[in-house]
Image (tube, grey):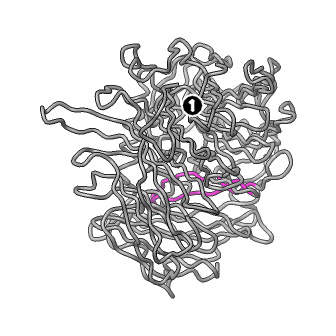
Amino acid sequence: MVRLRLNFPRPHNSAPALLFALLTLSACGGGSTNSPPNTTTSDDAGLLRSIVSNEEFVSQFRAAYIRPTSSNKQQNSTMQPVAAEAGGATDSNGSYSTTYTLESDVDEFDVLKYDGDHLYIAPTLQARCCFIAQRATTAEASSFAPPSPDQSGGIRILSTKPDTASAMEVATIPLQEGEYVQGLYISGPQLISIGSTQYYGPYGRQWLGIGSWLQQNLSIKIYDTTTITAPALKWDIGIEGGLVDSRRIGDTLYIISRHSPQFENIYYYPSNQNEADANAQKLAAIQPQDLIPVLTINGESRLLFTPQNCLLSRDDQDQTYAYPVYTSVTAIPLTSPGTAESVCFNEESSGLYISQEALYLSQYRYSDKGESTRIHKFKLTLGRPEYRGSADIAGQLWGPGQSDFRMSERNGLLRIVTTVFTHDNEDLRDHQLSILGEASQSKTLELVASLPNARRPQEIGKANEALYGVRFIDERAYFVTFEQIDPLYIIDLSDPADPYIAGKLEIPGVSDFLHPVSNDLLLGLGRGGPQQQSIKLSLFNIADITQPQELNSVLLGVDGGWNYSEAQYNRHAFTYLPSNTGPDRLAVPVHSNYQNPDNSYSSENRLYLLEINAKSMPSTASVDIVGSIIASPAPNATWYGGQNRSVLDGNAVYFLSGDAMWGGIWGDPTTQSGPY
């Protein structure tokens, strides 16, 4: 077997084509013509079980390669058989905004972080949509490059002056050749960078292919920023495998990774018995250490976990499935990273949701019964997360967009909404709400309630409507479905055993992203206007959940152009700063392409500044545009950097577009400075 070194090779040129094909598959839905399964749980032992011996650990892995693909119902069957050669709510700290997160006390890594004094910026063009892209050429990048292009490849640290909305670069952390930073965390005087050879973002089905995960590594670097002008690398951590996602809760960093061991001359998708027999011969002598990924901390290496810290899928007992992959959850104490602990299981993970108390990993599954989603729950404790139970739910959860909004935990119960593809041309999809809780005497998640059900049969959404924006807020859920109009559904969850549709509203347009302004107000961001070409913000009065009302809406972007906001699909691009004394403030980036009178085409990146006024009076509240900041030079820019973020600090506005930072004053955004 080839043991990989912990370095960062350049991505293969075939990655964009492969990922495009996989994303196309994801967008098309699909599945079996048979009815999908109902929500189920397994016997008292649960869907994952403890490993009995090292030999069982090895034999389960070996089984994935010693049966032809046609008889081995692997999840990893999205690529053709080949013989291999060797080789993922803003916390407002007073006067400034921070990264918008799904859970207020669960931090998420991002390309821009702010601590009130310094902006930390990861370089752009590390990932476009779902694959690692090569850097732009000098000509492409010149119009948006910061003043020091030779430093654009590193993590930049800018000191801010909010009174003037200006900034100054005080340090740059250089990156190694081929090192790709996917995002950053800040925790006190520590800057944490998360790097990966490849990162596919919060998408679902491309996780299925084995080939996508070979020869991957991820890197966690922890810098001491006590002396901000000279950050010092204190911890250099490497993990064999691909990055699924990460979160930070307090002083603990959680890394979810996936590892597919690589072997020489192995048929990763054996198509006949001869290839399966050849695999069996080559893998006859493998040992646990040949399969377990390596963890390297400051140059010292050890295995990431032991077989005794790994769980096996109970599916393998009847030889239905075999998984040649391992998903690991690693808890890294930021105060003592050397004591990191991991738990693993031998299935892929399509995505995750994390509350303060628990981590839920989801897995897309397909069988002759249709599409389903498997959920594994891990309790977050000091040290290694503890497995608590699993369930299978009909339909799929993960797809393009911010699908982790489809999951929420409250009082120990998981609320989750999935979509079942029916293959009925009259009604192609059904949306199902499920509420799951831990069984008292088994490692299972049992069904507490579902909607629709026999007592409450009303469907969530009309026939053929897709599910877009989803938000669980306390004891309510808000769903936006869409085909020609935008119905907003409000689900009452106050009795977890009896959820029901309390009210709905039908308006033009569609909301991809929902934000709670208050108990009585909800903000929706999506598309609207003629031919849905503009970015639409709608403010809803939800004081009476039986009769929600749209108070007003605004359209963002260039009239007649094609407009797109990264905030539609990435919450980190949305900035919100609540206020107890005045209007709430928010910022939304919009990228616009439009045709000029001479038939030429132009594009621009603009940050729209908006306010929520009269929020204490829900019947008269409104969302209003107060200005914008443009990332010049526009409208003649020919290259789009791909990442847009913003920070609000008092009256100062900072707008990151690509690698360039711009500054403006809230009361006078037309007077802007930069690029920094």
| Outermost residue toward the left in this view | 598
- Above or below — where is 492 with respect to 105? below
Which x, y percent locates residue 487? 37, 71
Kind of residue at badge 1: Ser
Q: Residue at x 64, y 44 (%)?
A: 108
433 in relation to 206, above or below: below
Question: Quick one: 667 or 434, which is closer to the camera?
Answer: 667
Quarter of the image where one finds residue 171: top right
Say left or right for 479 vs 385. Answer: left
Q: Residue at x 33, y 35 (%)?
A: 604
Q: Which residue is mark 1?
A: 166
361 in magenta: yes
Residue 204 appears in the rendering: no
Residue 426 in the image: state x and y as whole percent: 27, 71
Is residue 369 magenta-colored?
Answer: yes
- Residue under the image location 74 percent in, 24 percent down: 228
Q: How many marks overall?
A: 1
Q: Residue at x 52, y 70 (%)?
A: 521
x and y, in percent, of residue 652 in the image: 56, 41
Pick whichever, 155 or 582, lies toward us.
582
- Element type where label 1 sits in the image: strand
Q: Is residue 122 above or below residue 172?
A: below
Q: Report whether residue 551 is seen.
A: yes
Instruction: Give the extent of the magenta segment.
Output: 358-378
Q: How far from the left and from the top, in percent, is residue 644?
A: 48, 38
